[in-house]
Amino acid sequence: MSKTFMLQVVAPDQPVLAEEPTLVELPGEVGEFGVMAGHMSLLSALRPGTLRIIKGHERELYFIAGGFAEVNASSVIVLAEEYVKAGEIDVEEAKKTKKQSEAILSEKKEGADLKAAELALHRAEARLKAADENKSLKK
Amino acid sequence: MAQIKEIKTRIKSVKNIGQITKAMKMVAAARLKRAQERILGARPYAIKMADVMKNLASKAGEEVHPLLAIRKEGPTALMVITADRGLCGSFNTNVLRQAHHFMQENPETVLLTVGKKGRDFFKRRKYAIRREWLGVFPRVSMETVLEMRDEIERMFVAEKFKTVKILYTEFKSVITQKTTLDTLLPIKVAELPGEGKKKDYEAGDYEFEPDIETIMEKLISQYLATQIHRYLLESFSSEMGAKRNAMEAASKNAGEMMAKLTLEFNRARQAMITKEIAEIVGGAAALQ
């Protein structure tokens, strides 16, 4: 059994999520990375994506909407803008958002906030991906 | 007879008012509870964030970000947070009195208002309002917060403001709320609240991904948004607290008033009966 470490996920509008996993996989700005106990100190920006918390044989998935991760030898703190348990993702809502933002991006209307639409699209896609992965995991 | 009828209608209207204030009190209490939960939820995030930022700034030096710039000169901006509605005791008056005082001392200040009451107050006094936000409460959405953040950031960075201050009502408890003037920008990293677990930070040299500037930039704008969010929630909680108290007092007054009126009503009724009996007795005596 490998060593565990402290993981805290905090978001402005949600309660703190505290876990003691053996491995965490995070969606870093420059690429996904995994963290185990004794990792070197690291501060990374996160993009919208899937957070995987692995405890021995258990595996829990969350969607996080970007933020930061502060990694120490004994702890990981994730400052997320939002987090959702993969099983609780509203797939219909995400699909709708995805369609809407795609429409905005393809029309390129004047005055439309393209940057916001792009961000919304990324988030919706990340949400769907997390939900998909969770589904195949359960099978 | 006419007097009795008059008192009766008054009792009825006081009773109605009492019912309304009681209902408003309940609504305020429920909203307060929800707002408080949100503040408690937001607090650990803000503290953790301040921790990370403190650590970063000590590594990067204070010049690294435009929002940390300390200027000797430049215009000042004041953001005043009030409610959209009244009926909450002296909540709005307290904020506006202090804001007015501030404006008289620093007439050059650029005004930003949140809430209808603040906007109306300054409009009536012919102050120029740079930007106003209405209908922010009770659902303080992140979208609005980001809009405020962007405006303030633009003023500070592009227009070289010296400082952006915020006047809001701090929520101490349901009974006490305090009008507070805080500085939003520039952010003084050294004064940030936080647990400050120094040991960890000195021990490990951090690696940054993608790089320290990008992280700092994202982190600081995010921090500013969190701050604004917190101020709005504090103000809303205070508003609901003040409203709850005001409505409680009003309900109490209505109850007292009703007791008084009922007493008056009974007296008038009694007087009428006595009068009638006296008349009957008088009439009977005349017949004999």
Image (spheres, rainbow, N blue to C red):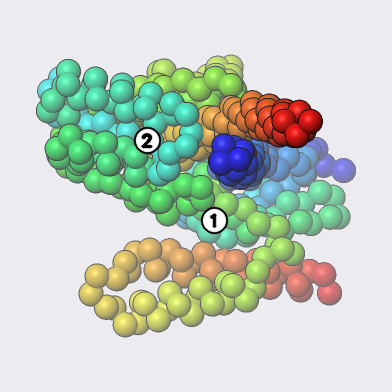
The answer to whether residue B239 of the structure is visible from this angle is yes
Residue B70 in the image, given as x and y percentages of width and height: 23, 23
Q: Depth check: B281 or A134 in front?
A: B281
Q: Is the residue marked by circle 1 packed among few (<14), some (14-19), or many (20+) residues within 10 Å?
A: many
- The residue that disc 2 covers is B81
Look at label 1 and name its amino acid. Ala
The label shown at residue B193 is: none
Q: Is the residue marked by circle 2 packed among few (<14), some (14-19), or many (20+) residues within 10 Å?
A: many
Q: Quadrant of residue A57?
A: bottom right
Secondary structure at badge 2 equals strand
The answer to whether residue B59 of the structure is visible from this angle is no
Chain at tag 2: B
Mark 1 → mark 2, Cα distance in angstroms:
29 Å
Residue located at (54% from left, 56% from top):
A65
Residue B261 in the image, given as x and y percentages of width and height: 63, 30
- The residue that disc 1 covers is A65
The answer to whether residue B19 is left or right of residue A105 is right
Residue located at (24% from left, 25% from top):
B100
Secondary structure at badge 1 equals strand
| Relative to B272, residue A95 above or below | below
Residue situated furthest front in the rendering:
B288
Q: Quadrant of residue B268?
A: top right
